[in-house]
Image (spheres, rainbow, N blue to C red):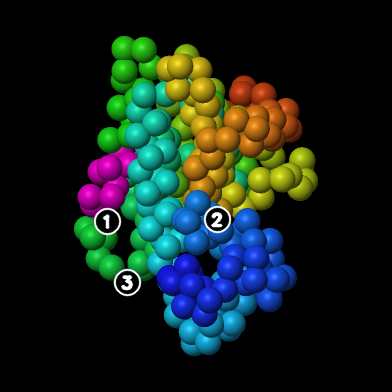
Amino acid sequence: MLRHLRERDGLSLRDLAGKLGYQHTYIHRAESGDQLPSDPLITALDKHFNMGGTLIAFLAMAREGSVQEYGRKAAAREGIAERIQVFTSSTIPALLQTEEYARALLRTARPKEPPNHFSEDVAKRMSRKQVFHREDAPPYWAIMDESALCRPIGGKQAMAEQLARIVKAAENPDITIQVLPFERGEHWMLGGSLTLLTAPNGSTLAYVESFGSGELVESPKRVVELAQRFDQVRGMALPESESLELVRKYLEEYR
């Protein structure tokens, strides 16, 4: 649509970029589908072409579709990964979630739907745990912010079952669990999550999520930057033994 509107008005990429104050390469990436435009850019484009909010609505639909597509790609890579590293800032990592916790979390997107509406999505999420049952199960390293422990998603009983599941999962020698405590203060991943998946050929991709948006990162340079960020957060987190003590503390409070 962006390309159609620009060509309709006889504008080159540089012409349009000059009128809006953006780089022509950025607008080209948006036109070609290589990068979703930012809210300010799409608002400027919508106003320039007098679209009455249509482009803004298209961006919302594109974001929803891209999140679903990126999520499917990441899940597929997860199933064959040689190593999985995850950080979450406000929820329990997906591979550690119980069915009730996952259902409560999924319902936040459509709270008026009946509980059984999400059965298929919950089943898909649970099926991803088969990665732990592979003959060559990958090392799994999960770090979660303390806020993931203290927010009673699904209610106290569901949360108690969830934390009990985490304690049980930690018995697996291939699974390492750490908690980043509140006392560490601010950190760069507040409000988001990061998954690093190492493939059999040694390459790594990253999946970043934040507030309903997702991005699959394959650029080696960016992946290295994100891996370094993960290492920084890991250095701030409690050792595994102390992390599990904190999990058990919250578990007893929910019980």
On the image, the x and y values in percent for residue 193 come to 56, 44
Q: Secondary structure at mark 1?
A: helix
The kind of residue tagged 3 is: Lys
- Tell me what residue is drawn at x 66 percent, y 45 percent: 189
Q: Nearer the viewer, residue 238 or 218?
A: 218
Q: Is residue 21 visible?
A: yes
Instruction: Give the image location of residue 166, x and y in percent.
Output: 46, 32
Which of the labelled discs sits on residue 118, or is there none?
A: 1
* Label 3 SS: loop
**Residue 22: image tag:** none
> What residue does disc 2 label?
29
Cα distance in 3D space between marks 1 and 3: 12 Å
Q: Residues within 10 Å of mark 3 (few under 14, many from 20)?
A: few
Magenta stretch in the rendered image? 118-126
Residue kind at label 1, given as amino acid type: Phe
Q: Nearer the viewer, mark 2 or mark 1?
A: 2
Spot occupied by residue 223 in the image (x, y as percentages of width and height): 60, 33
Q: Is residue 154 above or below residue 20?
A: above
179 or 218: nearer the viewer: 218
Relative to residue 241, is residue 162 drawn left or right?
A: left
Between marks 2 and 1, how big is the CA–CA gap? 35 Å
Q: Quick one: SS at disc 2?
A: helix
Q: Which residue is mark 3?
A: 112
Other-residue count near label 1 (Cα within 10 Å), few / some / many at <14 / 14–19 / ≥20: some
Q: Earlier in the sequence, mark 1 or mark 3?
A: 3
Residue 137 in which image quadrant? top left
Query: Number of labelled discs?
Result: 3
For marks 3 and 2, give the CA distance: 37 Å
